[in-house]
Structure formats: C-alpha cells, structure tokens
Amino acid sequence: MFTRRYASVIVFLAILLALYYLPASRDTLGQRPWANKAIHEPTACYGPRGGLLSNNSDDQVTPIDLDIPYPIAPFGSHDELSLSRTWMTADIKYGPYGYGDEREGYNRKKVNWEHVNWGRLQDACAARNQARFGAIANVSSRGRMVPPNPVAPRSAWSRTEKVTGRTAIVLRGYDTYNYAPEDLLNIRSLIVEAGLSTGGNYAVYLLVDIREKEHEIYMSEANYTAALEKFVPVELHSIAVLFDETLLENWYPKTATHHPNFQIYQLLQLFAHYYPEYDHFWQLELDVRFSGHTAHYLDALDAFARKQPRKQSLERSSYLYIPSIHGTYANFTSLIDATLDGGGVWGPVEIPDVKPAGPKPSVSSQEDEFSWGVGEDADLIATNPCSNVTWTEDWVYRDWIHNFQNGVDTPRIFCAPAITRSSRRLLAAVHDAQAEKGLTIPSEATVSSFALWHGLKIVFPPQPMYQNPPRDLKEMDVFFNGGPPNASRGAMAKGDGFYNARPHYDITNTATWWWSSPFPGYIFRNWLDQKENEELPFLLHKDAEGRVWAPNLALHPVKTN
C-alpha cells in the first residue's frame, strides 16, 4: 500500500495531467502534424564544457574522409541510406566525452562528468529551439512514472496536438547493471550527438528496472531517491526514470506476464503515455554502439523509411538486402513487385481482436503506383528483417500467445532484436489492447504484429552489416532469404537464417548487427584499445601513425556486463 501522503501526491499529479491533457481519440494521431509550421533553423546548444557546441571544437565530433578503399557492406548499403563513407578513430568519436583524458597529450578541456547535468542541458537545448518545437516539457523534472489513478481509465491517453517532430531515445538498464567507462562514453555520445548537436531533435532517457520490489520505489519519495542513488551513476540521475514490475502489473493486469524478457515494450508504451511530446521512440539497449556520428546514422534510417511507399513494404522488410544479388534497392523493389504482380499485404491484416487504427487504402494495390505512404513517417523502423512467426521452426516463442480468439493461428511477424523506433500511435494501439484485453505476444513480435493488424507503416532500412569471416553471398542469399522472391510464399523471405537458426549459429553469430554475436565486441575493443596479441578486425584500418580507424556503422551487441 502507498503511504497516504504519497498516494495523495500521485492523485494530485494525475488530476493536473488530466486537466492539461484531455483524452485523445487515436483518430487524431496523424503523422508529422508539425510539417506545416514555419521552418526554423536549429539553434546551437550548450555542451558539457559550458560553451556552444558550434563554437567549441573540444565538444565536436567530425567524421573524416580517408583516401583509402572503403569496406563494402555485403548486406545493406551505405549508398542506399545516403550514409557517408567516413571514418573515425576512437579519439575523434569519444575524445569529447572523456576517452583518453587520463593520458598525457589529451588536448581537450577536461570535464568533471559527475557535475554534468544532462537533463538540464537537454532542457536548455529544447528551450533554445522552442520556435521549432512549440510547447516542450523538461527532461530533468519528469523522472516519474506511477501506477494508474484508480479513479481514471487505465487506457486514457493524452492529447497529441502538441506533437513536435521530436524523438526520444530510450535506453534500457537495470538495477545491478555495472556502468563501465565505455558505457558512460556511449551514453554521453548519444546525448551530445543526437540531442544537443541537432538542437534537440532527440532527447535521451535511461529507464532503469528495479527488479527487487523490496526497494518499494512507489511507496515514498525517499525510497525512490535511495534506489536512484544506489543503482544509477550520479552523472545519469537527471535522465534516469526508475520502475519496477508493480507499475506494469497495475497498468496491464490482464496480460500473461510483465517480465521484460517477454514484454520489453510495456514500459516503452507507458513512457510514450507519460511523455506525449515525442512523435517517435527509439528503444536502444545499452550494448548498441555507433562508430559514426549518432544523429547522422539515425537520421539516415528515418529519411530512408519516410521515402518508402507502403506498397510491399512488409515484403521488402523481410529480406536481408544484398546489393551484389539484388542490384540497387529500386531494382530489388521491382523484383518483389514482379513476383507479386502488383499485389501483397495492403492495408490492415485484420483479426477479430483488433479494430484497425491506421488508414485504409483508397485504391487497390495494383492501382497504386508506389505513391501511398511516400513522405509519411514509418510507424515502425526495424533494425533487422521481419519474419512470419508461424513459419519458424525453432523460435522458442512461436506458440507463446495469450487472449487472442484464434490463438496460434493469428498472423504475426517478429523483428529481432527488439531495437526499434516506434511511433506514438503504434505504442498507443498496443497499450490499449493490453490494458483492455490483455493481448499478449512475445517482445520481438509485439510492435511489428500490432503494426500489421492496424495497417501502420513498417520499414526495415537496409543498414550496412558485415560478417566475419566473409562468406559466399549467393549462399547467404539462400541461407537468409530463401533465394529470389517466390510467389508461393507471398514474396516474403524464408531462409534458415531466420526460421531455423539454432543449428547455424556458426553463420548467424558472426555479424556486426545481430541479437547475439561476438564480432561487434571484438571490433569495438580493438578500436578503443588494440591488444598486441589480437589481430586487427578486417573492418578497421591502422594508419602509418598507428591510429585505428573504424567505418561508419552500428554495432550490436557490445557487452560490458
């Protein structure tokens, strides 16, 4: 039970929120409503050294063009994403955030990182750009999510007229996580490169799962503060939001479980509820790394997804795009279309449990000239191909489905890992279904399947990915995609790499981006501090001065715990 005093505070806050935000119909959750505003250039923001980032070279991260051959990605494409073929040393990338500051010759102003208030810096940045964003809410003063007010409907969502075009980057941590120095370098880089250097287009938060309920963080302010001080580094206090399963149990009493292994999106759904000023929400694990400029990479994924038509987007997103096999992405699109004779998944895939919230097409798929959806933000950006759950042979969660009328026959897709960008309207749709009906499927299938049922836009941008060692790409096309598009399977990819992966870990677990692979960590360790007894990964380049350069890509997982 809550203490009387703390419960009254919660009710008071709930009333204030209710007065400020009237319940919204999901019909008003349109895309990019800010697009007709007057265009304002981003205003420069202050960095951790106290100066404007635009004026302070110590805070700046500048990718470099080197006159050397660039490693061509066998999967995905820098060119198709308009992603620069640039390089960085660890010092260029992480030097502004304290990398190497213990060494002689560190030529940047040193920072006492425990005294940096990242929440205030992000707040000040958003305030300086208020002409672009309109009404804003502070990062540093919003550090609470509480169980629902018992007198208010659990599924009520707040108004969305204040949507601004901003994106939240939500990092997932837990109470016993040991924040290694490179974790802190990574978090600082996300805040500065994505948040501050863009004038506040992004804001970074850290959600911390307090797995031991004995800390009773909802009982009192003192308990919450004690847990914050015990489990989160001082530097991250202002961006941290603590929770435990009590929150999820109270908001979603009908779902089969609240454990993050099965329901990693429940907390993100609630985060979107409490932070309605963001259009989109990147869910990143703490073991994700960007070897290039973070904002440039995320912006490239966003821009590619926005340009994609809805037509056959799901089918394209099921493939691991291989340029040497598929040609340009435009040619790949034509291959899919020819196989489907202009057809494919079109609008919502309706099931009896869900009333679609997304738009319905006004013409048939064959009549559409790949125009519907172009210029529309993707509701879901996946970071790996999306696959048909019912086709899987060894996915342990294939038949894990609860409270659906058609049970295991319900059409579902999964996109693993659960590192995605979700729109607020997609998260609202999942929230409603789980709060009202307890519809429950595994984490990796949650937002993708709900997007399928609601007719929302799904895109897997072809981000660059490498293998170690490199393999024959014709064989890899068969292994991951099942070979060329095939009409008998609806032009969906179907290869053992995604549908029967367990016997083939020697192939799948060698990628720069996967749910489980030692290669990203091997690259990252050698980039930051090459070991004399380790051979330099082929992706890295050592110059005549001994500096190690990394190409522009995303890495996952890079484990420190």
Image (cartoon, rainbow, N blue to C red):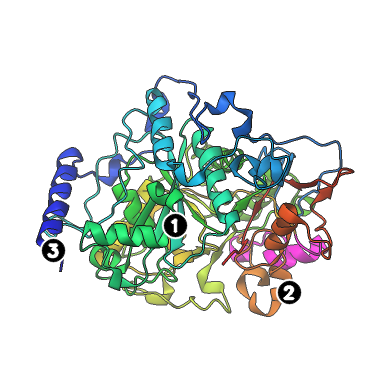
On screen, residue 247 versus residue 321, left or right, reads left
Mark with earlier residue (2, 1): 1
Front label number (2 vs 3): 3
Percent across and percent down for residue 310 are 51, 45
**Disc 2 to disc 3, how far (Cα)?**
54 Å
Percent across and percent down for residue 551 are 74, 46
| Amino acid identity at mark 1 | Leu
Give the quadrant of residue 203: top left
Identify the disc placed on residue 3.
Answer: 3
- Point out the image quarter for the N terminus: bottom left
Front label number (3 vs 1): 3
- Which element is circle 2 on? helix
Q: Residue at (30%, 50%) from the top-left corner?
A: 273
Percent across and percent down for residue 224 are 28, 59
Identify the disc placed on residue 506.
Answer: 2
Residue that carries the numbered disc 1 in the rendered image: 452
| Amino acid identity at mark 3 | Thr
Mark with earlier residue (3, 1): 3
Q: Residue at (56%, 73%) from the top-left corner?
A: 391
- Which element is circle 3 on? loop
Residue 485 among magenta residues: yes
The local crowd at label 3, few if under 14, some if 14 to 19, many if 20 or more residues have their Cα within 10 Å, is few
Residue 331 among magenta residues: no
Percent across and percent down for residue 61 are 64, 36
The local crowd at label 2, few if under 14, some if 14 to 19, many if 20 or more residues have their Cα within 10 Å, is few
- The magenta region covers 467-490
| Amino acid identity at mark 2 | Asp
